[in-house]
Image (tube, coloured by chain):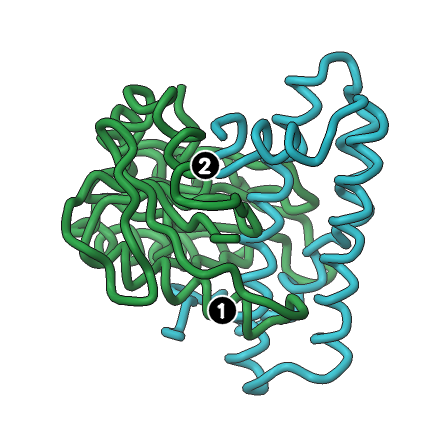
Chain colours: A cyan, B green
Amino acid sequence: MKDKVLAAPLNGDLDAFERKIPHLSNALSRRIDADPESVQQGLAQLVLTIVELLRQLMERQALRRIDGGGLTDEQVENLGRTFMELDRAMEELRDHFGLEPEDLNLDLGPLGRLL
Amino acid sequence: MIELLAITDDPVAPPPPLRLVPAGPVAVVVGPAPEGEVDAEALWDRESLLEDLMDERALLPIRYGTRVEDDAAAAAAVVPRGAELAAALERVRGAVEVSVRAIAPEGEEAGDVGAVHARLSGLAREHARHDGPEPLRAAYLVDRAGVDVFVAAVRELQQEHRGLSILCTGPWPPYSFAEPR
């Protein structure tokens, strides 16, 4: 993987940015609770959250690689947990809106509302 | 099961084991659905695939973990949105996503992120500000040929705004600009 940092801050403090990356579970629950009004909107928000968080995860990975090369066992474990939380959140969302997994796949699909 | 990676309209076949499934005016890049745990390596592998594809063609990245039964299901999901997707591809063609975040250095007040965002927006085809704990968290859709100029502008802004720490990453597939309008 190429170096993804195009321009670093003057003080070189990348950790400060990493600390800003939220825990997925918090972000998800906040978004879902924030606007359960319509299925479309709820789903769309979740998708946007996921897309943004995925990119942030990527950034975080990139920062870790630069800082120390490689991930610690703990970070790998966190990432696994993050995705379990994501699965759980999707399940809750399905229950909440009375959707089958297939529906969600269709609604959440590739590009957000697209598939 | 197959995994969907990206929407494209380039007819050139991607490197195996990836394949192209035609879907109306566009096509879906699909691959075998990876088994096992999701971990950092799996994410990077996927990101790498997308970036290699992105070097050669315009694409819209598909959400991580999107799987369908077979080629027919992939095509069936995409065909009804074919025209919209073709338009969305035009939006991102020849451009990449660059991410910028700005925070206050430890123990200091945040500087003027509005000016930073305004300058960078002027160098981008499109921009998207995201919610977040940082004073500025934004994605910019930048012409490939303009990335160097964009990054140079970020460096200048960092020099001008000592009250901010600015981090710029990329180039990314157009994650923030993939949604059809």
Q: Is residue A33 left or right of residue B141?
A: right
- Residue B121's quadrant in the figure? top left
In front: B98, or B31? B31
- Residue drawn where x is 25% and y is 65% of the image: B15
Q: Position of residue B55 (x, y in %)?
A: 22, 58
Element class at badge 2: helix
B38 shown above or below B50: below
Q: Are marks 1 and 2 on the same chain?
A: yes
Amino acid found under the numbered disc labelled 1:
Trp
Q: Can you identify the residue that label 1 sits on?
A: B44
Name of the residue lying farthest toward the top: A37
A68 shown above or below B101: below
- Residue drawn where x is 15% and y is 45% of the image: B11
- Residue B23's quadrant in the figure? top left
| Number of residue marks | 2
Q: Position of residue B47 (x, y in %)?
A: 44, 62
In front: B135, or A40? A40
Which of the chains bears the disc numbered 1? B
A83 shown above or below B22: below
A43 shown above or below A72: above
- Residue drawn where x is 33% and y is 41% of the image: B7
The crowd level at tag 1 (other Cα within 10 Å; few <14, some 14-19, many 20+) is some
Q: Position of residue A67 (x, y in %)?
A: 56, 81
Question: Could you tell me how far apart the alpha carbons at marks 1 and 2 are, in whole angstroms?
Answer: 26 Å
Q: Is residue B105 left or right of residue B13?
A: right
Q: Position of residue B83 (x, y in %)?
A: 28, 20
Q: Can you identify the residue that label 2 sits on?
A: B73
- Residue B84's quadrant in the figure? top left
